[in-house]
Image (tube, rainbow, N blue to C red):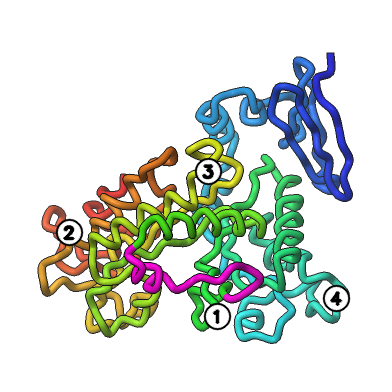
Amino acid sequence: MKKYAVIEKDNYIYVKNQGGIDIAYSKESGISILEVDGFAFKDLNKNGALDPYEDWRLPIEERIDDLSSKMSKEEIAGLMLYSGHQAVSTKDSIFAKMFGGTYDGKSLEESGKDISDLTDQQKSFLKEDYLRHILLTVVDDAKTAATWNNNVQAFVEGLGLGIPANNSSDPRHTPSANTEFNAGAGGDISKWPEPLGLAATFDPELVRRFGQVASKEYRALGITTALSPQVDIATEPRWMRFNGTFGEDFILSRDMAEAYCDGFQTTEEKNGWGRGSVNAMVKHWPGGGSGEAGRDAHYGYGKYAVYPGNNFDEHLVPFTDGAFKLKNGTKEASAVMPYYTISYDQDHKYNENVGNSYNKLICRFTT
């Protein structure tokens, strides 16, 4: 007996499973549904059979194991990479110009396309390079961002195993954008102080509330990962990224980090992961506020992090005792972004002065 109902929308099919998980898919993706035991499932790899990873009745771990076993080396490598910055904007801004693309080899105006359509470059890294992690910057408005996200998901749903895209964003909630690492800020979204301003409230519960509000707005934009919070201890006053931190006190930063990550990730209805959750990617491990002479590690001349006060361990506290120990159901930040520095002479086990991403001792703290 059929236990589902099919509802056709403008450009997608919504399937309501009675007593099960509802599913939806794009009309343009080329996939179809399978009926098994009266329920509907998406045939993502188009093989005409229900594979374990397509079966929403199974435990998530079993579905992940099955999916990973079917992936090629190229597909696995693609999931380890990130796109360049992507703009979805017609506005005359430096960031829209920096991060724009072409449409069938033409400019947006020449092509007659909408800004919410995929660029040639986006189609290429999604299809040819198997990337699924996209960094979204400036957008025209919320509707445009949501439409573009739907177009991205429809495109990748029809490729290979049907792995969806994970759209990410640097912080977006400050009133204006003036750097590459907050290029999406100041748009059609609620406005809040910079993290340093939030820290000035000395109120972690306010920051938790911010995370709850911001996560809803991110999901409305089609964003599922926040490339934040930035919990670097601001111990070097010449560093240019002070306003993105919670200040120089590692205890306050610890409490703010916990509240921020928990607010973004934990949904109120489940006290854990839910449809409104946004992954928090805490950064920059093991701390980016100690760059030599305040030089930033985005550039070669800022490659060393130094600790003249012998306080390396303090820089870890907002991570280990904050972001990795959340009060509610998601338990820990879902991702970590290392900084690009070499934490100079801090590895006393292997004596390696290499980038934090490649240092065996420093990486061990996050596993």
Which residue range is magenta in the image? 186-202
263 over 36 or under it: above or below: below
Q: Which residue is mark 2?
A: 313
Viewer-nearest residue: 195 or 146: 195
* Residue 205 relative to residue 366: left or right: right
| 195 is within the stretch colored magenta | yes
The first of marks 2 and 1 along the sequence is 1
* Residue 247 relative to residue 5: left or right: left
Could you tell me residue 164's position as x and y percent? 65, 47
Could you tell me residue 140's position as x and y percent? 71, 73
Please name the amino acid that badge 4 sits on: Ser
Q: Which residue is mark 4?
A: 111
Q: Quadrant of the C terminus?
A: top left
Q: Residue at x 75, y 15 (%)?
A: 37
Q: Residue at x 25, y 52 (%)?
A: 360
Q: Residue at x 65, y 85 (%)?
A: 93
The first of marks 4 and 3 along the sequence is 4
Q: Nearer the viewer, mark 2 or mark 1?
A: 1
Q: Which element type, helix, strand or loop, lies under badge 1?
A: loop
The first of marks 1 and 3 along the sequence is 1
303 over 328 or under it: above or below: below
Tag of residue 245 = none
Q: Nearer the viewer, mark 2 or mark 3?
A: 3
Q: Which residue is mark 3?
A: 267
The first of marks 1 and 4 along the sequence is 4
Distance between the Cα atoms at labels 2 and 1? 34 Å
Q: In terms of image quadrants, where is residue 128?
A: bottom right
| Contact (Cβ within 8 Å) of mark 2 with mark 3 | no
Q: In terms of image quadrants, where is residue 183?
A: bottom right
